[in-house]
Image: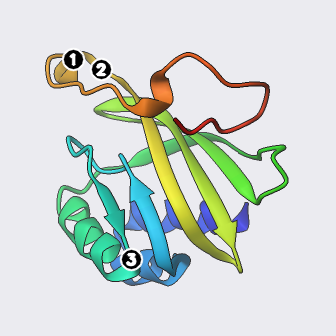
Amino acid sequence: MDVVRGFYGALNRGDLDALAALYHPHCVVEYVFDEDDGVYEGKSGVVGRWAVELAARHRVDVSRIAGMETGWGWVRAEWTSAQDAGYSHFWIEDGLIRRHRTVRRWGRVFAEKRVPTKFERPGGGGGAVVVY
């Protein structure tokens, strides 16, 4: 959970180097960036996309960071920003973010542009991440 706390601290400071240091070389990032439903693989692609995102100077207020009972090193963070709110899942492997995905609860500003993600489909079980 300390890695995820460090992630949000770096994000709110706009510290690209600190963010980059938290990602695994073979990371996968899904649906994380504003108005971008893309999937990015590999640290260089993820860090390049964060450079663009940080230029917009977004701030995220985290309400909760907690471990998920999957036994795989997943952490969930719930957050709000000026644009929307949602939660993010982080898979931590060897002390680095191996996988990062986000589900947004879009505000009125983005309601017309919203693209549902596969993680919003009904299904799943208690405390598990369900991938379709």
Quadrant (top left, top right, bottom left, bottom right) of the N terminus? bottom right
Number of the label disc, if any, that sits on residue 103: none
- Using the numbered discs, state the Cα–Cα distance from disc 1 to disc 3 in whole angstroms: 30 Å
Q: Circle 1: is it few (<14), some (14-19), or many (20+) Cα within 10 Å? A: few
First in sequence, mark 3 or 2: give its number: 3
Secondary element under disc 2, as helix, strand or loop, is loop
- Residue type, mark 2 in image: Gly
Q: Position of residue 58 (x, y in %)?
A: 29, 51
Pointers 2 and 1 in contact (CB under 8 A)? yes
| Number of dots carrying numbers | 3
Depth order, front residue of 71/23:
71
Labels 2, 1: front one: 1
> Mark 1 or mark 3: which is in front?
3
Q: Which residue is mark 2?
A: 107
Residue 101: give x, y in percent of width and height.
Answer: 48, 49
Marks 3/2: CA–CA distance: 30 Å
Q: From what the image shows, is residue 127 above or below residue 31?
A: above
Q: Which residue is mark 1?
A: 111
Is the C-beta separation of discs 1 and 3 under 8 Å?
Answer: no
The residue pinned by badge 3 equals 42
Whole-percent x and y of residue 48?
24, 75
Instruction: For mark 3, give the secondary structure.
Output: loop
